[in-house]
Each structure stands twice: as structure tokens, then as C-alpha cells.
Amino acid sequence: MKGNLSNSSSQMAGLFFVMDNNNLEGLNSWASELKERNIPAVIKVSEALLDENCYAVKAISEDGFDIFGGFDTEALWDASYEYQMENISRIKEKFESCTGLPMRFFCAKFLSYNENTLKVADKLDIEYIFVLGTKGARVVIYQTDEYKAKIISVSSVLSSTGKRGSLCDHAMSNCDETHTGFRDILFNLNEDNIILAGWTTKSGVSLEWRNVFREFIDAGRVSWRPMDELNPEIIRLPFAEVPINRKD
């Protein structure tokens, strides 16, 4: 799905990221709204949804969104190569069997990862790993010397309560931020590239949180783009020098 690109130099480039946690109602709600607005998105679906509602996942994939299966069972900060290969390959197989599409993206619970995640990604031809932000609200990509898979550092912001979390309804709510406080955070953004995430279990089903997203989208401050057109800075360095955020 092509984005609503604009020539306005005052706009931020943005990727919209839908995070599913096995909530079909919220997933369909977000997919329908984004399709209606012609906004491209990357959509992470849970393994449970692949197991129980493959038809819905397939239907959304046919609308042109970048969609993939994620691992929600536990964080991967300290997980072995064997453990990750077993779980990620299983999810990838389910996703590709369901949709008929290659799984180009991956993320785990809490956007966690370690070097073994990259080893598995390269083995399975996964191109992008979404991880907790290391550059504030600004999105960057780390391309390591050792691995082909790209590490996408998502937007991270400070809440009004002094806690830091990803730029999404779920993380900000966990930081004790209100939906009105989240609105203030969004309208104070000033970056070249951002990733804004909406959760199926939060803004997917809550009108007060959804309306904050709608107001921000309607303000026209962001040129929404697919991942391949987001064009964030690429930082090349050895894996040992990649900054890792282990706490959202």
C-alpha cells in the first residue's frame, strides 16, 4: 500500500505500526480505518490469531499492508539461538502458510532481542527486527557488520509522569499517561522520522484513545509511508557497538 506522500518540508515522515495482542475486533477496526484513509502500515499479529483466525489475517494482508507474525510469550533479551530458532521459525511457517507471503519483519515481546535474534533472522531471511528505541522519538536503523537483518529502533518518548516508553497508546498508558497527555506528546513531536503504534487492545477498542490518533492524523503533520519508503538514517557499526534498550 502506497503512502499519502507530501512535498511539504514541514512534515515528519511516519510509519504507522499496529500491534495485535489477539484482539480481532481491534485489529479489524484499525485495518478498516487505515485502509479508508489510505495510510500504509506495518501490522504485527499474534500467533494465537494466526492459529484461530487465519482467514482474517489473510484478508488484511490482501489489503496491501505489511503484515507479520510476532512472538508474545516472553522477552528474548537472554534467549538462546536454539530457543529463538524454534519459536520464530514456527511463527514464520504459520504466517507464510496462512498468507502465502514471505515474513519480512519480526518483533518479540517488549520489542526485545539479542544477537541470536539477528542470527535467526538471517537464517530465515527476515529483513527487519523492531526493537525498543535508542534515539528518543527519532527512528534510526542499525545495520551491523555481521548480519543482513536491519534493526529498527522505534520512537521512544518521555511521559508527563517522567517514565519513558515507546510512542504508542499501550506503553504510555503503562507509564500512567492519560489519553489527553498522549495527545500533548504527539503534537509536540518534531522529528524527521517517527513510528507511531496503535494497539488492538487499546486504541483498537477504546474510542477516547482512538480519537487522539484521529486528531493527530487529521492535523496533517505526518507523511505516512510504508517501511521501504520511510528512509530513516542508517547507522553502520559492529553489533557489539549497537546500543540496546532493555527497558521500555
Image (cartoon, helix red, strand yellow):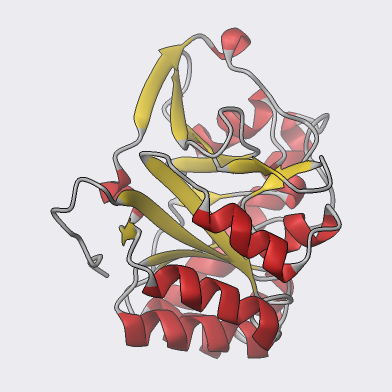
- The image shows residue 83, relative to residue 26, as above or below, that is above
- The image shows residue 26, relative to residue 174, as above or below, that is below
For the point 61% across and 52% down, the residue is 167
- The image shows residue 84, relative to residue 106, as above or below, that is above
Residue 180 horizontal/vertical position (percent) = 69, 68
Residue 174 visible (yes or no): yes
Q: Nearer the viewer, residue 21 or 36?
A: 36
Q: Nearer the viewer, residue 156 or 160?
A: 160
Residue 198 lies in what quarter of the image? bottom right
Residue 9 horizontal/vertical position (percent) = 20, 45
For the point 17% across and 59% down, the residue is 6
Residue 140 horizontal/vertical position (percent) = 45, 31
Quick one: quadrant of the N terminus?
A: bottom left
Q: Nearer the viewer, residue 229 or 103?
A: 229
Residue 240 lies in what quarter of the image? top right
Residue 19 visible (yes or no): no
Quick one: quadrant of the C terminus?
A: top right
Side of 1 relative to 93 (left or right): left
Residue 186 lies in what quarter of the image? bottom right
Side of 199 relative to 171 (left or right): left
For the point 38% across and 53% down, the residue is 14
For the point 29% across and 39% down, the residue is 231
Side of 154 relative to 227 (left or right): right
Query: How many dots with numbers?
Result: 0
- The image shows residue 232, relative to residue 159, as above or below, that is above
Side of 91 relative to 152 (left or right): right
Residue 168 horizontal/vertical position (percent) = 64, 58
